[in-house]
Amino acid sequence: MARFDTALQSRMHAPHRHTRDRTIAALYQAIEGSDPMNQDEEQQHAGKVASKLCDCGRWQAIYQDNTTGELIHSQARCKHRLCPRCNAIRSERLAGNIAEHLDKLNSPRMLTLTLEHSTDELRDQVRHLVESFRRLRRSKQYKEKIRGGVAVIEIKWSNQDNAWHPHMHVLVDGVFWEQAQISKAWEIASNGSKIVDIRMIHDRSKAGRYVAKYVAKVGNVDGVPIERVPELALALKGLRLVQTSGSLYGSTHNKKEPPREEPLQHIAPLGPLADAVAGGDDEAKSVAAELRIALTCRRRADTDQLTPEDEQTCRQAARKLWDWWHDQTKDPDDEASARLQNPDRLSSPGDRSLWLWQEPEHPPGALASGR
């Protein structure tokens, strides 16, 4: 939780502090005082998720592409669905990806499919919802009316009913389909549920937002009783929250960047620098200031390279960061280490062979994209 976070983590999760702390507290409460050898599946999973959320952003580091000189800030995010920050990033990307496919839609509508109230375990209810939607998609009526869609699962807790209410929102593209006919088709597919709602989307620019907001909601457990959060975590395990089909198949996928010519090189962890800056270290402040500027330099789309000026900026910032970090960790009695302090060892930005330093080890997941 907050008191165990690094300075970088505290800033990274500040907008979602309350929700994140409440989620972690709820997960740890589920395993408090239990025997690790006798924990049930829900408790075991709660411990794993809590550990992931606590480590989200802990092992931040700076890497460099030796080919272009570009600096990469690796945030090592957990990317778990109960992490509010990771879910917010996922939601933004999802909205952007869907927006690129809106021109393909003939008549976009938002279809909501709901199950009858149930006291079954949440995992069983979600499984029933997914299987019911799969049967609906395979039905003759659905295939005749719907060209494609993006389906998102939303899981809500009702204090009034003291129960879970999982339902599905589907951005659909197709021809007019009467609500009464949809209700009957859903009743057959879900074995009894008739509750459906379908509405025209008049502003296409907001269609992606309509879908993406439900993704972000999953990571917000503020309205869920603290003792039920572990149940939600287990229900989300291995669950595909977003499904695409037909004309919108693949519309939620992130674009893959072309592979880099050379692997990224680890320059230094970022946490110690942030701690030194917070402690008033003037040298660390100078290094951090140059690093902030260098991290804004991006490759040009036409050449996939930095400008010569930006490359110079990045390589100088990387050199200063590495020098600073080496000074913090070097052994004063190590002659080999002392020889590395030759300030002339980097003759020019273009001499890539001089930038092939590599830390022997770095934390697992450090290369997770956080850009």
Image (spheres, grey):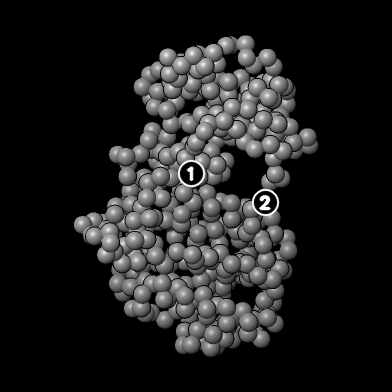
| Residue at point 53%, 65% (across, down) | 240
Q: Residue furthest left?
A: 33
| Residue at point 56%, 73% (across, down) | 111
Is 15 in front, or is 340?
340
Image coordinates of residue 116 in percent, x first then y, are 42, 81
Between disc 2 and disc 1, the foreground one is: 1
- Residue 188 visible in the picture: yes
| Corner quadrant of residue 350 | top right
Q: Amino acid at mark 2?
A: Lys
For the N terminus, which image quadrant?
A: top left
**Residue 32 left/right relative to 99:** left
Q: What residue is pinned by disc 2? A: 255
| Residue at point 54%, 53% (across, down) | 90
Q: Rate crowding at label 1 as few (under 14), some (14 to 19) or many (20 or more) other CA atoms within 10 Å.
A: few
Secondary structure found at label 1: loop
- Marks 2 and 1, how far apart in space? 24 Å
| Residue at point 69%, 71% (across, down) | 246
Image coordinates of residue 196 in percent, x first then y, are 51, 78
Q: Amino acid at mark 1?
A: Pro
Secondary structure found at label 2: loop
Image coordinates of residue 259 in percent, x first then y, are 70, 44
The tag earlier along the polypeptide, 2 or 1, is 2
Image coordinates of residue 128 in percent, x first then y, are 47, 78
Q: Rate crowding at label 2 as few (under 14), some (14 to 19) or many (20 or more) other CA atoms within 10 Å.
A: few
| Corner quadrant of residue 330 | top left
**Residue 98 left/right relative to 48:** right
Q: What residue is pinned by disc 1? A: 364
Is 270 in front, or is 363?
363
